[in-house]
Amino acid sequence: LKLHLWSWMGLGPCRHRQPDADIAAGRAAAEAAMMGRARRAWGSAEPSEEERLTMLKRKIGEVEALLSEGSEECDEERFGTNGPVASGPSTRTVVRFPGERGDVVVIIGTSDHARIPGHVERISQIVDAAYTGAGKHKRVSTYDAMDRLEMGDAGPRANRVLHLAYKGEALVGCASSTFSPGWTPEGCGHWGLLAVDPEYQGAGVATALVIAAERRLAQVSEAVQIEYEYTEGEDFSRRLMSWYESKLGFDGGPRPRHPGQRSFRRCFKDIPEDAQRRGQRRRLQEIRTWLAEQIAETEGSLSIRKSSTQSTRFPEEEVVEDESSDD
């Protein structure tokens, strides 16, 4: 099934997706990749819109067949006995917390969000404030933020994306997730750049971002990798270790024992099989939605072209009829 999820769109297993290819796919978006595969299918010539429509309909039929093989499952996932509940596609994950914390909505950013006034600057501010507050140096320029948002334009083909967290209408945090960054083991996804506006820390935003990122990675990955710097005896490092390696369930191996000793911890966590199964089905559903949008767009373009062709042809025919009647 995992090979189906990648190969039907011209992708190999996720381990072959390198960072440079990810950036190129994000910028060119899914359209260029789809057309490239179509050119291989029909030869060097650019496929017509009719041929592209045929291909899209064939692909959505394949996805429907895969979906029919499995059983419908509840869209909601609960994390912990009394923990938050997540629902929705990876493009818009709603994380509901019990009590007064309320909901956090996590979406996958695209170039549309880059066009919202102040949004790109807000992402840079959040990363700056979050890492500075923790005594770390991490910056995301507006150019980098725009580049990360554009990667989401590839839809289900995207390798790396930027998740944006909202409380109400306010953008309050971000994180990235990548199916194959190029430095993780085979079948192991990655998330990072986790940042929450200091004013909203402690409100579940970081937890919501991690849930959204790991739900997306569960679509094609068997495990998740993260990294962080640890200093033995440092209070902030102890809190990070407690959250990453206790609450979130990552394993970074033996910890340093001498005060002041530093280490760069690479931590791993297996994705449960039931989460992988739900993720794979959710990915198929998202691919189906994307294909349906592409079909509607192509059919609309064909309809406009047909109308345009008719409007330019009919007046000429009317002139000929008028001349004939005069004779």
Image: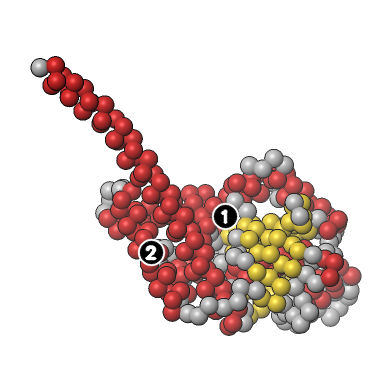
At 35% across and 54% down in the image, what residue appears? 53
**x and y percentages locating residue 297 in the rendered image:** 43, 49
Q: Is residue 193 above or below residue 143?
A: below
Q: Is residue 110 above or below residue 219?
A: above
The residue at which mark 1 appears reads as: 152
Q: The N terminus lies in which quarter of the figure? A: bottom left
Q: CA distance from mark 1 to mark 2?
A: 21 Å
Residue 89 visible in the current orientation: yes
Whole-percent x, y for residue 295 in the image: 41, 54
Query: Residue placed at 78% from the left, 79% from the top?
Result: 82
Foreground residue among 248 and 278: 278
**Dot 1 or dot 2, earlier in sequence:** 2
SS of the residue under disc 2:
helix
Q: Nearer the viewer, residue 170 or 17?
A: 170
Where residue 114 is drawn, which disc sits there? none
The image quadrant where one finds the C terminus is top left
Q: Residue at 40% of width from left, 46% of height from top?
A: 300
Type of amino acid at the residue the image marks with label 2: Lys
41 relative to 84 in the view: left or right: left
| 2 displayed left or right of 204 | left
Please provide percent x and percent y for residue 17.
50, 64
For label 1, the SS is helix
Considering only vertical position in the picture, is 208 above or below 110? below
Of residues 241 and 291, which is closer to you in this image? 291
Q: Residue furthest front?
A: 325
Looking at the rendered structure, the kind of residue marked 1 is: Gly
Q: Which residue is mark 2?
A: 59
